[in-house]
Amino acid sequence: MITSTPAVAAAVTGVVGVAVTALLDLGLIAPVALAIGVAVAAACAALLGPRGSGEAASPLHRRLVPLVAGALAILLGLLTAVIADLWLIEPVAYPLGALVGSLLGFWLHRRLGTLLSLAISAVAIAGVLAFALTALVLLVTGVDPVYTFGRMLSYGSQPDSIVTIINTATTYYLSAVAVAIGFKMKLFNIGVDGQYRLAALLAAAVGGAWVLPPGLHQFVIILVAVAVGGFWAGIAGYLKVTRGVSEVISTIMLNSIATGITAYLLSTDRLAIEIGTNNVGTPPIPESGWIPGIPAGFMGADREIFGLSLLAVAVGVGYWLLLNRTRFGFDLRATGQSATAAQASGVDVKKMVLISMVISGMVAGLVGMPQLLGDSHYYALDFPTGLGFTGIAIALLGRNHPVGIALAALFWGFLNHSAQILDIDGIPKEIAVVTQATIVLTVVVVYEIVHRWGRRYEQQQVGKELGRVKVATS
Amino acid sequence: MSQTLEVATPQVAPPRARNRWRILSIVFAAFVALSAVRMFTGQPVLTGSGTIQATLAFAVPIGLAGLGGLWAERAGVVNIGLEGMMVFGTWFGAFAAYTTGNPWAGLVAGVLGGVFGGLIHAVATVTFGVDHIVSGVAINILAVGAMRYLSILYFQDAPGGGASQSPPLPGFPRVGLPFVDSLLGPVEERQWFLVSDLAGLVIGLTTDMSVVTLLAILLVPASYWLLWRTPFGLRLRSCGENPDAAESLGVRVNGYKYVAVLVSGGLAGLGGVFLAMVASSIYQEGQTGGRGYIGLAAMIFGNWRPGGLAMGAGLFGYTDALQVRGSGGAVHALLVLIALALVAVAVWQWLRGRRIVAGVSLGFAVVLGAWYLLTDTLPRELVTYSPHIATLLVMALATQRLRPPAAAGRPWRRGGGS
C-alpha cells in the first residue's frame, strides 16, 4: 500500500469516508454517522502512503499529527454538513460533508507540521478549559450550563444568524490582521481602535460630501480610509523610530486623542448633521458609493452578506503572500524573531518598524468599511467601537496565522451573536465575553506550556539520537 | 514583546541633589507664573481652594493606578491590565459596600478584587512566561465582561441599581483641619498676588478631605520608603533591573515579582474603590474611563519614580479639575501659561546657543498667545484629551532622558542566566 500514488490514496480515503457515513446514516443520527465515517477515513489516511513533510521521522509528529488531523477533519466535515444541510436534503448533505472531511483529513495528514499541530492542540485544550470555566461560572451563579450552550448552538446555527456571524467576523478579521502584522514584528499596535474610527469618520465624511461615478466613489472612500489609518499608525511608528517612544504607550494615547478628534468633528457645527433622534452623523453616502451585499437566499437567510467580506478574504490572502512569498515578509519575520540578527544581516530595522506600522494602520483603516459601505452608509455616534481590542484578542487566538485568525473571528462572531438569545431566558449574555476573555488567557498560557514541552521533547529526542550514534561509532 | 530600538541615551544622570532643587524651583516658578496668569486673566478658578480639592479628587485614581504600575514595573512586569484591575476594584468594592452597608468592607473587597486581577496577571506572566502586554490586554477584556455579567445578576433587581450600575453606596468619613478655612478663607478672597493663591492651596489641601484621599496621598511616600529605603525594596527593584544577577545573589525573583504584581493590583483596586465610592456614590460601568492607562502615562511622565508620578498625576488631575470647574474659560487662560513657559524655554535655549530650538519655541508661544487673544474658550474635546496629548509630547521630547527599569517587560525564567 505504501507505493500507492497520492491521488489513488486520496480517492480511497474519500470513498471510505462517504461509504461508512452513508451506511451508518441508516442506523444512527447523521452527525454521529459522519463523525465515525470521517474518523475511519482519517485512520485510512494514516495507514496509506508516506507523509509529505520531512520531519515525519520524529515520534512526536507520528503520534500527534494523525490525532490532530482526524479531529480537525471531523470538525470541518460536520461544519460543511451543517451548512450544506441548509439547502440540501440530509442524506445528501451528510455524505457530502463526509467527503469534504475525509479529503481534508487526508490532505491535513500529509501537510500538517509538528509545530502547527502543537499549536492546534493547544488551542483545543484551551477551548475545552475555557468552556469548562464558563460552565463553572454559570453553575456557581445558578444557571444550567448545558441548557445555555444548547440554546446558543441552536440559535447560532440558524441561517440568519450565520449571515450575521459572517458579517461581524469580516470586520473582526480585518482588525485582527491589522494587529497580526504588528505582532509578527513584535510590534504592539494597540491603536487599531483609534485608527479605524478616525479612518471611518473621515472616509464617511468624504464619501457623503462628494458624488462620484460608482466604482470611483467606493475607491475614493476606501483610499481615504486606508490613508488616514496608515497616517495615524505612522505617527506611532515615527515616534518609535526617531524618538524611541514605546508604541504601546503612544498608540494608547493616540486612541484617546482619536476619540477626542472624532467627538470634536462629529458635531452639527462641523462634519455632522442630525440623524434621527439623539443621534448625529456624517451626511449619508449617496447610493453610488454603496457596496451591494451578496444575497444569501441559497441557505434560507433573508439578510445579505457584506460585499466587502470578499475584501477581507483578499486581505487575508495578501497577508499570507506578503509574509511568506516576499522579501519584505521575510525581513519582517526575521526582525520579529531577532532584531539584532536581522540588523546584522543587512535589514534596516528602523525602516521595517515604520513600514510595518504604516501597513498595519492601513489595514486598520479598512476595518470600518464593511459596516460603512455595506450597511449604515454614514458614521454616527452609534458606529461600532472597541473593534481594535477585539482584533487583538482574535489575533492572539488565531496565532497570527491567516487561516487561524479567520476561524477565531468566526468563533468570536458566533459567541457574540448566539449569546443574544440568552437575554430572552434571563441569562446575562455577557457570559459570552467571559468565555472569550478566558479563552484568550488560556490559549496564551496553554500555548506557552505546550511550546515549552514540545521543545523539551524534541531536545530529548535529539539527545537520544545522538547517544545512539555515539554508541554505534565507538 | 515590544521591539527594542537603540536611541542614544545619556549614560550619566545629573547628581541627585542638584536635580531635586531644580525640580523644586521649577515647581515654585510654575506656581508664581500661575498666580500671575490668574491676576492677568481674572480667572480665580485657576488657584481656588475648590480647584485644588477637585484636582486631588481627579488625581488620586490616576496616581493610584500609576503607583500600581510603578510597583509592577520596578519588579520587571509591565502591567497594562491596570485598567481591568481598577474595574475589578470598582465592582467588588461596590458589591461589598452595598451588601454590608459598611464602606470599609467595600474598601477591603475592592482592594482584594484588584489583587485578584493581579494574581491572574502574575500567574500568566511570572509562572507561565506569557507576554506581559498580551496578558494585560486579556485581563482588561475579561474584567469588563465579567463585571457586567455580575452586575446583571446582582445589581439589576436591587433598588436603584441596574445592568450597568449599582444601588447608592455608603460614603467614607471626611477629615480636615477645621480652623484653616475660617483663618485663611478671607485671605483667599482678597485675590492678592501669590498670597491668596497660597491660601487657596493650603485650604484645598487641609479641608474636607476623604479618608481614602489621605490614605492614597500617604501611599506615595510609603511606596518610596518601601522601594528605595528598605532591603525588601532593593531586592524587588533588582528583579526589575537584572533578574539574573538578583537570582545569583539569592533573591527569590519570582516571589518578589508575585508580591509586586499583587500589590500593583491592590493599588489599582483601591483606585477603583475611590472612583466608585469617593468620586461618586455608585458603581457605574465604564467608570474607570481609561484611568489605568493614564496612570501608566503618569508613571512614565514621572520617570518611574513615586515623586514624579505624583506630579504627573497632579498635573493630569489639574487639567481635569479646571475643565469641570472652570468650563473652558479657565483652561483657556492656561494657554497664556503655556505661552509664557515656551518663552522661558526660548530664552534658555537661546542662552545655550540653540538658536533654532529657541526660534521654534518662540514661534509656538506667539501662536498660542494669538490663539488666546482671538478666542474665548477652547473646544471641550481638546481639553478632555489634553493629558494624552501632553503624555505624547513628553514622551516624544524626553524619552531619551527617561530611564525605565532595565528588564521591564521581559519574560524571565528561573535559571535562564546560567
Image (cartoon, rainbow, N blue to C red):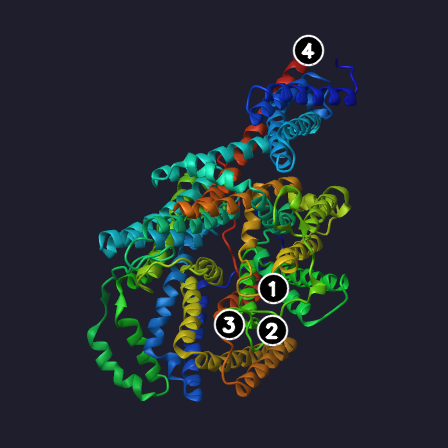
| Mark 1 or mark 4, earlier in chain | 1
- Label 1 and label 2: CA atoms lie apart by 13 Å
- Farthest residue, direction front: A89
Q: Which chain is mark 4 on?
A: A
- The residue to which callout 2 is attached is A271
Seen from the viewer's position, the closer of residues B310 and B321 is B321
How would you rate the neighbour count of disc 4 (Cα within 10 Å): few for under 14, some for 14-19, many for 20 or more? few
User: Could you tell me which residue is drawn at 67 percent across and 43 percent down?
Assistant: A298
Q: Are marks 3 and 1 in contact (CB under 8 Å)?
A: no
- The residue to which callout 1 is attached is A198
Helix, strand or loop under label 3: helix
Q: Which chain is mark 3 on?
A: B
Nearer the camera: disc 2 or disc 3:
2
- Amino acid at the residue labelled 2: Leu
Seen from the viewer's position, the closer of residues A90 and A370 is A90
- Whether residue A304 is visible to the viewer of this picture, yes or no, is yes
> Is A363 positioned to the left or the right of A279 in the image?
right
User: Could you tell me which residue is drawn at 27 percent across and 59 percent down?
Assistant: B169
Helix, strand or loop under label 2: loop
Seen from the viewer's position, the closer of residues B9 and A31 is A31
- Amino acid at the residue labelled 1: Leu
